[in-house]
Image (cartoon, rainbow, N blue to C red):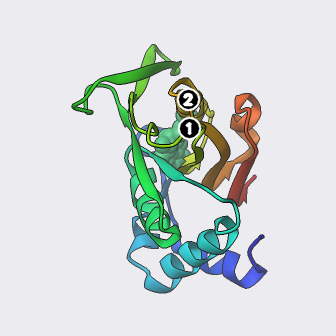
């Protein structure tokens, strides 16, 4: 299920571009203006609910921090659980971690070791606001598999297509807005 052209416009126009943030040359896609626009936010969440209600999912896993907003609401709408995938050092119980490279150095994401344990081979949707180089999402998707669940699809509100960030993600990828 994809969006109508009109729905796409409503969502696209609600996202603000901030040039040179957090550093020169980057155009930051600011979703705070989407969140504060009830029509755009509702259009997006209803679209995601309609798309994923037939996927027979057990969990939505959201990436720290903006993936928590979309993922938390979607999980509740689908009547299933939400699992946070967090930056290193934030989760209180035993975790499994996955490192990924940044332009300079490394970063790390973690999930609780028992996050999906109440269901064998749990079917999980991964969600974040944006995929750029894909490092974060690729690490998050492999974390889901590492703790014994299945990443059924990775979903992004925006994909920066020119970076081809989805190339190393094994699951299907769905992006609501493809940005060239
Ligand atoms: P990456 O690992 O390069 O795919 O980066 C993805 C993460 O960084 C996501 O959690 C995004 O929220 C954030 N991010 C990267 N680039 C941008 C951008 N141009 N605008 C907003 N967020 C971004």
Nearest-to-viewer mark from 2 and 1: 1
Q: Residues within 10 Å of mark 1 (few under 14, many from 20)?
A: few
| Residue 172 in the image: above or below residue 114 | below
Q: Label 2: how many residues lie within 10 Å, few (<14), some (14-19) or many (20+)? A: some
Residue 118: in sight, yes or no?
A: yes
Sequence-wise, the earlier of marks 2 and 1 is: 1
Please determine whether, in this image, residue 108 is positioned above or below residue 112.
above
Image spot of residue 103 (x, y percent): 53, 20
- The quadrant holding residue 96 is top left
Q: Residue at x 76, y 44 (%)?
A: 172
The residue lying at 42 percent from left, 53 percent from top is: 82
Foreground: 167 or 118? 118
- Which residue corresponds to mark 2? 148
Indicate which disc residue 120 carries. Answer: 1
Q: Is residue 151 left or right of residue 173?
A: left
Quadrant of the image containing the N terminus? bottom right
Q: Which mark is residue 84?
A: none
The answer to whether any part of residue 164 appears in the image is no
For the residues labelled 2 and 1, the Cα–Cα distance comes to 7 Å
In the figure, residue 111 lies in which quadrant?
A: top left
Who is closer to the viewer here, 82 or 129?
82
Q: Nearer the viewer, residue 152 or 70?
A: 152
């Amino acid at each position: 299920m994809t969006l109508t052209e009109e729905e796409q416009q409503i969502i696209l126009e609600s996202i603000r571009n901030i040039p040179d943030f957090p550093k020169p040359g980057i155009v930051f896609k600011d979703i705070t203006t989407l969140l504060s626009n009830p029509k755009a936010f509702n259009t997006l969440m209803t679209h995601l609910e309609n798309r994923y209600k037939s996927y027979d999912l057990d969990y939505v896993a959201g990436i720290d921090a903006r993936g928590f907003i979309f993922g938390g609401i979607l999980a509740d709408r689908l009547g299933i659980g939400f699992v946070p995938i967090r930056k290193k050092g934030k989760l209180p119980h035993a975790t499994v971690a996955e490192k990924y490279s940044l332009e300079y150095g490394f970063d790390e994401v973690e999930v609780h070791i028992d996050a999906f344990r109440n269901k064998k081979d749990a079917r999980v949707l991964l969600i974040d606001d944006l995929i750029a180089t894909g490092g974060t999402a690729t690490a998050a998707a492999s974390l889901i598999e590492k703790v014994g669940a299945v990443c059924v699809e990775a979903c992004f509100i925006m994909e920066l297509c020119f970076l081809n960030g989805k190339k190393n993600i094994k699951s299907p990828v769905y992006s609501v807005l493809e940005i060239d």
